[in-house]
Image (cartoon, rainbow, N blue to C red):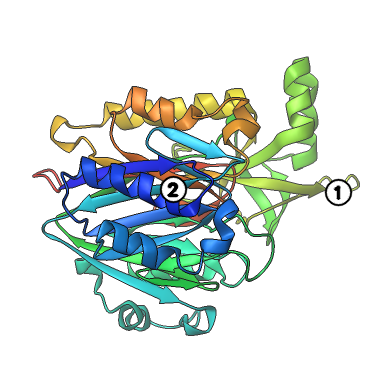
Amino acid sequence: MQWSSAISDAASFTEAVHEASEQILAKLDGANPDLAVIFISSHHRPSYFSAPEVIAEALGAKVLIGCSAAGVIGGGQEVERRPGIAMSAAVLPGVELSAFHLNQDELPSPDAPPQAWHELLGLLPVECPAIMLLPDPFTLRTDHLLAGLDFAYPSTVKIGGLASGGGQPGENYLFINEKSVRSGAVGIAFSGDLTVETIVAQGCRPIGEPLVVTESEINVISRLGHQTPLDVLRELFEAAETREKRLIRRSLQIGIIMDRLAQDSGDGEFLIRNVIGADEEDGTLAVGELVQEGQVVQFFVRDAQAADEDLRMMLEEYIDNLNEEAIPESALLFSCLGRGQYLYGSPDHDTNMFTEMVADIPIAGFFSNGEIGPIGDQTFLHGYSASFAMFRKKTKID
């Protein structure tokens, strides 16, 4: 197994492809890759239609997947607000790759059996340790896709990000082999001698204590323990320092433990969602996720410091559990449009932290309209997150 990544910020599409593909092939010792993953900034929009064919030919790639991007990541750099093409490529002996393109009308209905999804992808769960997804946010219900895949492939890791760079339907492009499409989702199902691990850093830090939802309806929380959510927030606000009060006003989030087995202990991973609004009269709180009575929740705030601390904590946890035989050989990073320079004030923050803390390995990715990754035993579409997928050969411990 051999991976490489490259990036070019050349203004000319032809020059950028030549520059990045030359870097890739040099790092692969001239071997043509089995897989190429490409992300192309919107500055190169006029070349989107022909891009996959041109790049597949330049690399000699057997399978190619990618999408348009508002910003791209590769070769140790995060390129934002300027032209960029990022590539990740790999020679993968013993790994089978099944590329697919799905439109919304092809997805099985919510009550369809798992077999409908198996037939759609042409794969059984035992054959499929990981699936990478690149949906268009305007033309496909990603939540429907993820729920169906979790149901049909419960042990399969699902990773990816929503195409970006376009502001309305038809403006984002998805790339699959030598084709460009403007709707649905493209993806790759991996099988064989490959393990994919994930880190989802949601960029927040907790405030207050975990609390049990004692009354709720759909996405509206009425009681937390014996208090209304608004009463809990008022107490948190009054006890907070000045800086914390500003964050509560500007960037309040709520975390929900989704793992049913972790509800009693409160030790599960929190799924972070927006606080949509509050009712001053009855003290209820509307949030961006369905909430059930008995679930554990906690309030969170988000800023650059919180994002830095959260990613550092997630990476430390990953390193602590990392076996010497299981060091990743490559990574893909699906990062929110709201991170990068916009959040930190300087480029390359998340890439540099991963490289310094985990390993100096090839990394590629893009700034997406939403990030796909697991929390507990379910896969979710996230916002504001940095979602890493780490690739390596299988070991005896897998």
Residue at image x 52%, y 73%?
184
Q: Which residue is mark 2?
A: 16
Which residue is situated farthest in the left direction here?
Answer: 396
Of badges 2 and 1, nearer the viewer stands 2
Whole-percent x and y of residue 246? 78, 25
Which residue is situated farthest in the top direction here?
Answer: 241
Residue at image x 32%, y 82%?
115
Q: Determine whether, in the image, residue 183 is placed left or right of residue 179.
A: right
Residue at image x 56%, y 49%?
295
Q: Which residue is mark 1?
A: 279
The foreground one among 12 and 297 is 12
Under mark 1, the amino acid is Asp
Q: Using the rendered image of the protein, determine whether residue 240 is visible from the camera's viewpoint.
A: no
Whole-percent x and y of residue 356? 35, 22
Note whether 226 is above or below 134 in the view shown: above
Q: Determine whether, in the image, residue 261 is placed left or right of residue 243.
A: left
Q: Which mark is residue 42?
A: none
Whole-percent x and y of residue 218? 68, 62
Q: Determine whether, in the image, residue 163 is placed left or right of residue 5.
A: right
Q: Crowding near pointer 1: few (<14 within 10 Å), some, many (20+)?
A: few
Whole-percent x and y of residue 209? 60, 29
Note whether 225 is above or below 143 in the view shown: above
Mark 2 near mark 1, Cβ–Cβ under 8 Å?
Answer: no
Q: Secondary structure at mark 2?
A: helix
| Image quarter of residue 23 | top left
**Counting residues from the N terminus, which is met first, the one under dot 2 or under dot 1?**
2
| Image quarter of residue 57 | bottom left
Under mark 2, the amino acid is Ala
Marks 2 and 1, how far apart at CA: 53 Å
